[in-house]
Image (cartoon, coloured by chain):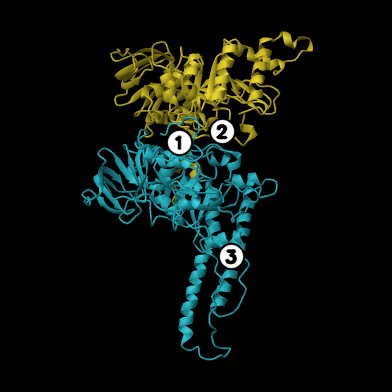
Chain colours: A cyan, B yellow
């Protein structure tokens, strides 16, 4: 967001003023003027109204714990209180008054994070009236925000929660070069999307490579990959110019020069946020050579792509991803459905991981999101059969700490570490088994789902009173 | 070059010889899909493409090639009941997409066997994960409720891999923009087929079908070929039950069937088979609001014969049948029942269970050896026999994997020179 940078700039002005204050005695035109407070737009106009559900002090004992950052503790204890993890280890003390859950034979992990979801924007049922994912009217729509389309009554949120998903990033679709902003949510029921917004999570920008934009705009353009890249460059150059105007304006204000602020452009606000490092780019790209183009593009315009999404050919350029610090958000085995997905292989995720790059799973699907533990199990099995020696503890990074990093919430969640948000899943068994299910799910230390307790199984407004449908 | 050709010929000769060879798979956990159930430490013997013995104490014939399957699972090959394997290479490319014939004037008269491509790169990935037979469908033209006449194929990639032409006729219960029109049209189409050829003589026309389609539908009207029709809403299923009653002896398979569990008893009484996706627990549309993980269990309890339908990836990820079936187990179905729904039950629906879907003497030797429980996501098939022949376990995907497993270092030759 640009707004934060304006605040920073203002802070610099204040310091500069402080530096000159002592000498600021005369009206000589050579003397520095008093800084003027620049116009700052509301930095968070659709603020989160999320409030955790009832938080408990809980000690989960005798569990096999995967911490999401490569560690496994057998027979361990996890303690959380007031929404945060307070202790973890083979001998962690159980605090007085804690609710003790004996997880003998069961596994405990960080909650699953899906950074590529269209829940709420392509909800269930798939009504025409609720098809909200692609603003396919122009190839550059950086001004639209997915959160303004999210329908909180999509029952897919509830189904995903039963699958252990505690954090979701809802993205616009991939019809456009610049699809718009995505939003990161706590997976709790809400009456408005604001009730679900992850407090403090950075915005993300969805962009797309390859076939989709050039197919959707084949008549008006872009109709080729080269025009895709031309479209990115034109937009980034506009964003640079816009940023320069705002930087100049803030600097002038700091020097006491009265100026009108640049006229506001919501499309360029988003792109400037990327250039300022505040909005994380999520780049839909399948082919290795498309990835190569974007790695150069981001250097040309001095921004960072956070993650390539789908990235079915990431395995071909895993070294470049590693060297450029870009994650790849992938499917376990989805592919083959179009030309740019033809070279998908089942070992994509483990091969990217083994090359030392940041590998993660994503669903892009209301059904797949319910079983991301199985998806990483498939990837792990395929990788290890191909000779990669990856542990389950390392593989859990693919659904937790690496996706957290890709959307910029890794300081808050994605691992079981003291101080992190208590986003926790207790699994009935080893979650790398088809037969394991989430017994209980916590978001911020509050139980939000329990397989055995209907009182902890949410149902959307839409599904209430519909034909008989069992709640498991 | 000569050497390459020679070695290929030798390899082919080896495959042919293996078909005639006697193979004994010993000591595995054998899932028979028969009254013998699951046999721990069982042996499966086959020769000339046919199973000759299955059991706990089967003698290994002298001269048999013995495969030690201790610690492994041995099952019948998987049977995907409804896919477009071999009909689509890349969906958005006309040159590689025969999924439907939207511009054709024909529907039932179209035949999947005329379009099926055994060389599709999507077939080996299905085969190496244990899928040995598949029901393949094709869509028809815009005006007709019917698609093409479908086929059952094997996954060998042989040019002659059509197992059964005219295995079923595909339809979607939708026509004219309303359910009212759908049933009227379906009745009219059956009446046309019944009245063929008389109605079409002397320049006569059918009410719903042209001459070729009416002729092609006659085996369905006679009940010789099943009609596989997509419908989801409970009331639609009841309408189709009634349709079957008044059109006896038609053989119906209802697919999709999101709300089948709401009318399970009626489906059982009408002896209608059902294809369901066991992980479809969210409503795709207003026609399937009751979609539920419980569906398969309810159908099982009611005595309905069901098989598992893949959700959407029906030409490229056919191998995910095992994960889907495993999830049916996760949500309450007995393991044996879930496995039958991806092996024997489809064979029964297409009246091919005398040849496929179980391990018993006389059946075709479609046999898979797995490194563990096939419904577990961590498991994988190790050896896949089709017609008694061990098949190639490499795929285009595995070649790409092997090419890129070690990325080039500075000075290395480009990977294009590595040809796994």
Residue in view at x 43 percent, y 23 percent: B298
Q: Is residue A237 visible?
A: no
Q: Residues within 10 Å of mark 1 (few under 14, many from 20)?
A: some
Which chain is indicated by disc 2? B
Q: Is residue A465 above or below residue A324?
A: above
Instruction: Check residue A240 in the rendering and tell me which mark sits there, or answer none.
Output: 3
The disc placed on residue B205 is none
Observer-side mark, 1 or 2, equals: 2
In the displayed structure, does residue B215 sit left or right of residue A318?
right
Q: Identify residue for label 1.
A: B398
Q: Is residue A365 left or right of residue B70?
A: right
Asked if residue B396 is positioned above or below residue A78 in the image, the reply reads above
The quadrant of the rendering that contains the C terminus of chain A is: top left
Looking at the image, which is closer to me, A92 or B244? B244
Classify 10 Å Cα crowding around label 2: few (below 14), some (14-19), many (20 and above): few
Residue B343: horizontal and vertical position, in percent? 44, 21
Q: Secondary structure at mark 2?
A: helix
């Amino acid at each position: 967001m640009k707004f934060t940078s304006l605040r920073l700039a203002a802070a610099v002005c204040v310091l500069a003023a402080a530096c000159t204050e002592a000498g600021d005695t005369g009206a000589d035109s050579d003397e520095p003027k008093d800084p003027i407070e620049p116009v700052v737009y509301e930095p968070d106009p659709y603020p989160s109204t999320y409030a955790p559900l009832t938080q408990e002090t809980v000690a989960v004992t005798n569990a096999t714990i995967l911490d999401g950052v490569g560690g496994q503790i057998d027979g361990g204890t996890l303690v959380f209180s007031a929404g945060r993890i307070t202790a973890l280890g083979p001998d962690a003390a159980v605090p007085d008054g804690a609710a003790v859950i004996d997880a003998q034979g069961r596994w405990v992990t960080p909650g699953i994070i899906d950074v590529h979801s269209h829940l709420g924007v392509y909800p269930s049922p798939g009504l025409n009236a609720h098809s909200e994912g692609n603003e396919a009217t122009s190839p550059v729509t950086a001004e639209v925000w997915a959160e303004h389309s999210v329908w909180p009554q999509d029952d897919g949120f509830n189904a995903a929660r039963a699958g252990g998903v505690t954090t979701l990033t809802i993205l616009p679709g991939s019809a456009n070069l610049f699809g718009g902003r995505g939003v990161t949510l706590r997976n709790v029921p809400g009456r408005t999307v604001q009730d679900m917004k992850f407090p403090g999570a950075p915005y993300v920008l969805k962009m797309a490579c390859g076939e989709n934009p050039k197919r959707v705009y084949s008549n008006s353009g872009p109709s080729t990959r080269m025009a895709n890249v031309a479209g990115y460059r034109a937009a980034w150059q506009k964003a640079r110019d816009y940023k320069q105007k705002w930087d100049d304006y803030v600097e002038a204000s700091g020097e006491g020069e009265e100026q009108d602020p640049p006229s506001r452009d919501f499309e360029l606000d988003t792109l400037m946020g990327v250039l300022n490092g505040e909005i994380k780019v999520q780049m839909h790209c399948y082919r290795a050579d498309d990835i190569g183009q974007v790695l150069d593009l981001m250097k040309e315009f001095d921004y960072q792509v956070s993650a390539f999404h789908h990235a079915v050919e990431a395995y071909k350029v895993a070294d470049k991803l590693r060297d450029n610090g870009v994650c790849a958000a992938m499917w376990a085995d989805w592919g083959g459905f179009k030309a740019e997905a033809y070279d998908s292989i089942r070992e994509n995720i483990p091969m990217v991981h083994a090359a030392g790059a940041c590998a993660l799973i994503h669903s892009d699907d209301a059904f797949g999101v319910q079983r991301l533990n199985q998806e990483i199990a498939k990837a792990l099995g395929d990788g290890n059969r191909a000779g990669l020696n990856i542990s389950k503890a390392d593989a859990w990074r693919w659904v937790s700490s690496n996706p957290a990093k890709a959307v910029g919430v890794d300081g808050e969640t994605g691992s079981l570490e003291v101080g992190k948000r208590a986003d926790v899943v207790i699994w009935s068994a080893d979650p790398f088994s088809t037969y394991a299910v989430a017994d209980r799910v916590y978001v911020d230390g509050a139980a939000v789902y329990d397989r055995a307790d209907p009182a902890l199984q949410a149902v959307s407004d839409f599904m209430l009173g519909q034909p008989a449908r069992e709640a498991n | 070059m000569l050497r390459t050709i020679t070695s290929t010929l030798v390899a082919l000769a080896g495959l042919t010889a293996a078909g005639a060879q006697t193979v004994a798979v010993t000591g595995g956990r054998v899932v028979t899909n028969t009254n013998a159930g699951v046999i721990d430490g069982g042996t499966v013997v086959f020769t000339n493409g046919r199973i000759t013995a299955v059991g706990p104490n089967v003698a290994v014939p002298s001269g048999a090639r013995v495969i030690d399957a201790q610690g492994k699972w041995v099952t019948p090959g998987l049977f995907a009941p409804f896919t477009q394997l071999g009909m689509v290479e890349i969906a958005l490319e006309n040159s590689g997409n025969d999924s439907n014939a939207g511009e054709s004037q024909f529907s039932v008269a179209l035949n999947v066997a005329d379009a099926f491509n055994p060389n599709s790169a999507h077939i080996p990935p299905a085969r190496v994960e244990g899928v040995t037979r598949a029901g393949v469908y094709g869509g028809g033209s815009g005006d007709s409720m019917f698609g093409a006449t479908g086929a059952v194929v094997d996954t060998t990639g042989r040019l002659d891999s059509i197992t059964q032409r005219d295995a079923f006729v595909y339809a979607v219960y939708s026509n004219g923009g309303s359910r009212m029109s759908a049933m009227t049209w379906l009745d009219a189409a059956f009446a046309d087929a019944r009245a063929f050829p008389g109605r079409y003589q002397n320049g006569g026309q059918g009410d719903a079908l042209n001459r070729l389609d009416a002729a092609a539908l006659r085996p369905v009207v006679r009940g010789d070929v099943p009609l596989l029709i997509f419908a989801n809403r409970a009331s639609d299923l009841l309408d189709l039950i009634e349709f079957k009653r008044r059109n006896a002896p038609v053989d119906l398979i209802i697919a999709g069937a999101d709300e089948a569990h709401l009318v399970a008893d009626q489906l059982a009484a009408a002896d209608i088979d059902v294809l369901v996706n066991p992980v479809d627990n969210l409503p795709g549309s207003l026609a399937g609001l009751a979609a539920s993980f419980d569906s398969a269990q309810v159908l099982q309890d009611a005595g309905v014969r069901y098989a598992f339908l893949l959700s959407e990836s029906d030409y490229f990820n056919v191998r995910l049948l095992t994960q889907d079936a495993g999830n049916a187990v996760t949500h309450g179905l007995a393991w044996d029942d879930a496995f039958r729904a991806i092996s024997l039950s489809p064979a029964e629906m297409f009246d091919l269970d005398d040849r496929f879907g179980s391990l018993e003497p006389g059946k075709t030797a479609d046999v898979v050896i797995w490194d563990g429980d096939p419904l577990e996501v961590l498991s994988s098939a190790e050896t896949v026999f089709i017609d008694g022949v061990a098949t190639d376990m490499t795929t285009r995907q595995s070649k790409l994997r092997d090419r890129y497993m070690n990325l080039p270092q500075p000075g290395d030759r480009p990977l294009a020179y590595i040809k796994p």
